């Protein structure tokens, strides 16, 4: 187990040795994905990057081709048929080999320079799973859609009522796992229902879960944001399904 000594303080990614698989689901991100992958690779904790192109219709797959030269540190995988973020993550998790796994979106809403924040509880031996919260308040936040924030908090509250966790941001992208935890979970959701599904299934394992504050640089629909109100309704169904109707 990779673990910090009690006297050490993790102040940046430079303090952490390579131990992390960054799984990046990608769909129609030709404008941002190359720079994002370069930024991820610059982070010292990153042992490998697993990129899953979910049958993008733009030039994303072409933009990603130069990264094939960085194998085995970069793994490029492509779905021939678009299936959704959850399906892309399932594929990525199957190919991850590092002891710790993080989810990284292919845009710039979440900053890889903050990996040390979400890794710290795991490396200190306190957590098996860490959620990076956009709502704990210590990081920078772009001011955007009010009703999105209301919806996120509402879904988090309902999820907490079902799981008996006290999370502040169930829908966050930055979820970090010891890889053996992921190996104990059979994931099913193909789209954004992944978030309440993984939360319910992690809660059922009774493993130690931590939450830390992170920055958030949200984007608009014009800039490529994809999640919508229908996904919120499906997330509500998934909260019910994976907490009460599914074992």
Image (cartoon, rainbow, N blue to C red):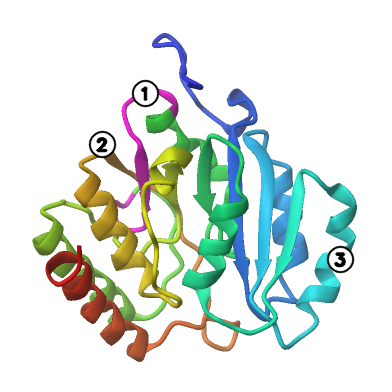
**For marks 3 and 1 on the same chain, the one whose residue lies earlier in the sequence:** 3
**Distance between the alpha carbons at the discs numbered 3 and 1:** 37 Å
Q: Cβ–Cβ below 8 Å for labels 2 and 3?
A: no
What residue is shown at x 47% (from left), y 70% (from top)? Answer: 86
For mark 1, does the 10 Å Cα neighbourhood hold few (<14), some (14 to 19), or many (20 or more) residues?
Answer: some
What residue is shown at x 22% (from left), y 65% (from top)? Answer: 156
- For disc 3, the marked residue is 65
128 in the magenta segment: yes
Q: Nearer the viewer, residue 115 or 53?
A: 53
Main SS, magenta region, reads loop
**Distance between the alpha carbons at the discs numbered 2 and 3:** 39 Å
Q: Is residue 92 left or right of residue 184?
A: right
Above or below, 112 against 91 in this view is: above
- For disc 1, the marked residue is 125
Residue 145 appears in the picture as rendered: yes
Above or below, 191 against 199 in this view is: below
Above or below, 144 against 118 in this view is: below
What residue is shown at x 16% (from left), y 51% (from top)? Answer: 166
98 in the magenta segment: no
Q: Measuring from the top left, give residue 44's x and y in whole percent.
A: 67, 33
Q: Measuring from the top left, give residue 159's x and y in whole percent.
A: 18, 65
**For marks 2 and 3 on the same chain, the one whose residue lies earlier in the sequence:** 3
Q: Secondary structure at mark 3?
A: helix
For mark 3, does the 10 Å Cα neighbourhood hold few (<14), some (14 to 19), or many (20 or more) residues?
Answer: few
Residue 126 in which image quadrant: top left
Residue stretch in magenta = 123-137
Q: Measuring from the top left, give residue 160's x and y in whole percent.
A: 15, 60
Q: Give me the disc on residue 208.
A: 2
Q: Is residue 30 left or right of residue 107?
A: right
Q: Secondary structure at mark 1?
A: loop
Q: Secondary structure at mark 2?
A: loop
């Amino acid at each position: 187990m990779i673990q910090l000594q009690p006297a050490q303080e993790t102040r940046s990614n430079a303090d952490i040795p390579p131990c992390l698989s960054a799984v990046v689901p990608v769909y129609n991100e030709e404008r941002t994905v190359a720079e994002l992958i370069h930024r991820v690779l610059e982070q010292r904790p990153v042992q490998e990057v697993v990129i899953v192109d979910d049958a993008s219709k733009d030039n994303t797959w072409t933009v990603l081709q130069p990264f094939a030269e960085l194998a085995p540190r970069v793994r490029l995988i492509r779905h021939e048929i678009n299936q959704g973020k959850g399906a892309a993550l399932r594929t990525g998790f199957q190919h991850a080999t590092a002891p710790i796994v993080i989810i990284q979106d292919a845009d710039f809403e979440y900053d890889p320079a903050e990996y040390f924040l979400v890794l710290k509880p795991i490396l200190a031996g306190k957590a098996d799973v860490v959620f990076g919260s956009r709502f704990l308040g210590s990081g920078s936040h772009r001011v955007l859609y009010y009703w999105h924030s209301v919806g996120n908090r509402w879904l988090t509250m309902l999820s907490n009522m079902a799981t008996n966790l006290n999370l502040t941001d169930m829908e966050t992208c930055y979820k970090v796992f010891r890889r053996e935890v992921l190996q104990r979970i059979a994931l099913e959701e193909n789209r954004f229902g992944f978030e309440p599904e993984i939360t319910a299934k992690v809660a059922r394992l009774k493993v130690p879960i931590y939450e830390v504050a992170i920055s958030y640089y949200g984007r608009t629909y014009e800039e490529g944001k994809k999640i919508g109100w229908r996904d919120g309704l499906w997330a509500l169904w998934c909260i019910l399904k994976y907490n009460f109707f599914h074992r």
